[in-house]
Amino acid sequence: MIQGQFRSSILQVPAEVTALKFRGYLRREIEAVQATAQSEEDIIVVRVFVLEKVLFGLGARKVDSIVQGVVGRCPNIQRIELEALLRPLTADEMQEAAADAQATLQALSDRVMASGGKLGPDRQAG
């Protein structure tokens, strides 16, 4: 049974962060989110908004390696979702993204509670 809290965090990578600086930036920010965990059982989902040019500059394999490395160091981070952007989000768009993340988190929480408090893959009735 899961005892911790479900939480989500929204990050927007600043436009001045280049492909070369992305790894360090992401590591620092995700470690800061990890530091907010109140117990070992907390589950945190992080949605990261980043400009396409940064992702394309790194390539898919490098981005995947960076994300896996960060998640491997932060036990409470359940998932990092990357959202590619053509331009930085406005404040209103960030609010909308936060509301979407909260809805996703609520759906996950509902699924876990329906399963008796176990976090696992969706089971389809056949």
Image (cartoon, grey):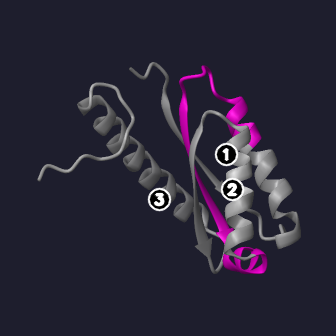
Q: Which residues are magenta?
A: 31-58
The image shows residue 61, relative to residue 109, as above or below, that is below
Q: Amino acid at mark 3?
A: Glu
**Is 44 positioned to the left or the right of 12 in the image?**
left
Residue identified by numbered label 3: 96
Residue for point 72% across, 77% down: 59
Label 3 sits on a secondary structure element that is helix
Tell me how far mark 1 sits from mark 2, CA to CA.
6 Å
Side (left or right) of 116 relative to 103? left
The reply to whether discs 1 and 2 touch (Cβ–Cβ < 8 Å) is: yes
Whichever of callouts 1 and 3 sits on the residue coming sooner in the sequence is 1
Label 1, on which residue?
71
Disc 2 crowd rating (10 Å Cα; few below 14, some 14-19, many 20+) is some
Q: Give me the C-alpha separation between circle 3 and circle 2.
A: 24 Å
Q: Is residue 96 left or right of residue 107?
A: right
Q: Residue at x 61, y 75 (%)?
A: 85
In front of the other: label 3 or label 2? 2
- Please tell me whether mark 2 sits on a helix, a strand or a loop: helix
Amino acid type, residue under disc 2 in the picture? Val
Q: Position of residue 87 (x, y in %)?
A: 66, 77
Of circles 1 and 3, the one toward us is 1
Whether the residues at callouts 1 and 3 have beta carbons within 8 Å, the answer is: no
- Report the front residue among 89 and 124: 124
